[in-house]
Image (cartoon, rainbow, N blue to C red):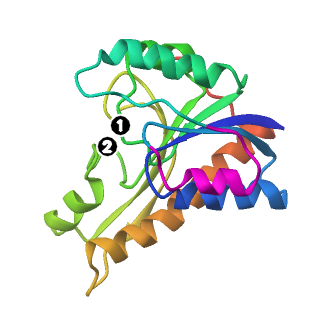
Amino acid sequence: MVRVVVLISGSGSNLRAFLDSCASGDIPAEVVAVGADVDAAGLDHARHYGIPTFIEPLERGAARDAWGERLADRVAEFEPDLVILSGFMRLVPAGFVHRFAPMLLNTHPAFLPEFPGAHAVRDAFEAGVAETGASVIVVDDGVDTGPILAQRRVPVRDGDTEETLHDRIKVVERELLAEVVRDIANRESAIEEN
């Protein structure tokens, strides 16, 4: 079993799907804690499963590196094998990345390197592309620039809104994350340091 800490910032819909898959035995992983940078609604999904939660806010004007150290210390308390950023809307400082890399993963709602950053779905939608996608990457010091572990295309349909497109992308993100974690747990793939 892979010990996982998940970091979120929002509703945690991808987290809920991941927790459900772990509970059903579909993913051989145990989520040992869920953390957030705000009092995120998604923390309730962890509480539903009796999983410890924590909040490590980045106060306005506070030093990012010091926040990153506090966040890393909170995560390390749970001795994870893997840390997953799932809808975590803060860039983690280099010190945090180096502490957990390469076992630090991020899901992203685009077919990277296309549409990096916080507004990937909106950017793809506004660009008028015929397809976008979803990716799971290893987090590095850049913005959505780490090694790609899995990705899949998602078509943009006639009549799509940004919301309907994002809903379909989330389904693919969940499938890809499950595949990657399953492969890691089963030692079918290894993540190499760069």
Give the position of the N terminus as an image quadrant.
top right
At horizontal 84% and vertical 56% (from top left) the residue drawn is: 25
State the residue lying farthest toward the left. 127
The nearer-to-camera label among 1 and 2 is: 1
Q: Disc 1 marks which amino acid?
A: Asp
Query: Residue 46's x, y, as percent?
Result: 66, 51
Q: Disc 2 marks which amino acid?
A: Pro
Q: Is residue 65 magenta?
A: no
Query: Residue 5's x, y, as percent?
Result: 64, 35
Disc number placed over residue 63 in the picture, else none: none
- Residue matched to label 1: 144
Q: Is residue 166 above or below residue 98?
A: below
Label 2 near label 1: C-beta < 8 Å? yes
Foreground pick, 53 / 23: 53
Lateral position of residue 32 relative to residue 132, left or right: right
At horizontal 31% and vertical 43% (from top left) the residue drawn is: 113
Report the span colored magenta.
Answer: 39-53
Query: Residue 117's x, y, as percent?
Result: 27, 43
Foreground pick, 153 / 57: 57
**Helix, strand or loop for disc 1:** loop
Counting other residues with Cα less than 10 Å from the Cα at mark 2, is it few (<14), some (14-19), or many (20 or more)?
few
Residue 16 seen from this side: yes
- Residue matched to label 2: 113
